[in-house]
Image: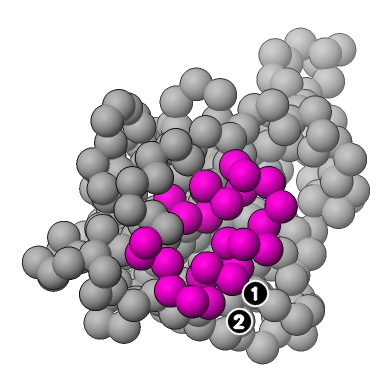
Amino acid sequence: MDTRPVLRLPRAGRPDPPAGRATAVSVGDDVVVEIHAARPADGGDALMLLDDAERRRHDRLRREVDRARFAVGRRVLRHAVAERHGVAARTIEVRTAPAPALAGAGAGGGRPVVPGGPRGISIAHGGQLVLVALCDVHAVGVDVEPLASSASIEAVATTLLGPAEHAALRARTDPELGTGCSRQLELLRAWTRKEAILKAVGVGLTVPPEAIVLARDGAPRVAATSGGLPEARRFALWDLDAGPGHVAALAVLRDG
């Protein structure tokens, strides 16, 4: 079983700096991922920093909390990159790279990129947390979900897990076997791990999550992939300690 510790994230507190609470986590082989944590309420200059395309995307979101999460994610990204380069956040341009063409992918996908910025960029928001991950060496993906969504995730369990994963999950969470692990929590962990992986590739949920097979013992490890995704050996995966009420994961996609 994989015994890597859960990576601890900074706690988003009051008041948060423009780039959120930041920490650098080592993911091995001299590779560091910089992770920033903020809250949807930390708006600040978020709306003023959005470009026209981002403003249109922001305005299409129906719920106020979704608009706040989106704007804060872009704000944190701009300020984090600006701090690296010693420039004003308003000068940072954020584009969307097209998703790679994969056999199993539908339309959409893509990932945020900053010209001249880090190679790997990923933004995630869920519940009361916004995360931004940056890596100079590899593509990365990060995902966060509130524990409150663990009940509703049962509805998508059939598309989230393949048959072997369902069997392994039952073995780990069956009360008759004496396990104390919650099925809903395990499903949420699987969801954040798989979405982090798909975001690292740049396809998001245009590829079915069941195209990724996670380790049968519940460790954060990719056992197999399909649907045109990179080979399992290229992914490194970590659970993130995002604090009370949230489950999060980080994926790193190494070069082939």
Q: Is residue 51 magenta?
A: yes
Residue that label 1 marks: 109
x and y percentages locating residue 154 in the rendered image: 85, 36
Question: Residue drawn at (83%, 20%), measured in percent from left and top?
Answer: 174
Towards the viewer: 153 or 43: 43
Q: Secondary structure at mark 2?
A: loop
Whether residue 56 sits left or right of residue 208 in the image: it is left
x and y percentages locating residue 189 in the rendered image: 63, 38
Magenta residue span: 48-73
Q: Secondary structure at mark 1?
A: loop
x and y percentages locating residue 32 in the rendered image: 26, 57
Residue at the farthest bottom position: 101
Question: Residue drawn at (81%, 49%), measured in percent from left and top?
Answer: 161
x and y percentages locating residue 113 in the rendered image: 41, 76
Label 2 packing within 10 angstroms: few (<14), some (14-19), many (20+)? some
Residue that label 2 marks: 99
Please state which amino acid type lies under the numbered disc 2: Ala
Q: Is residue 200 visible?
A: yes
Q: Is residue 153 magenta?
A: no
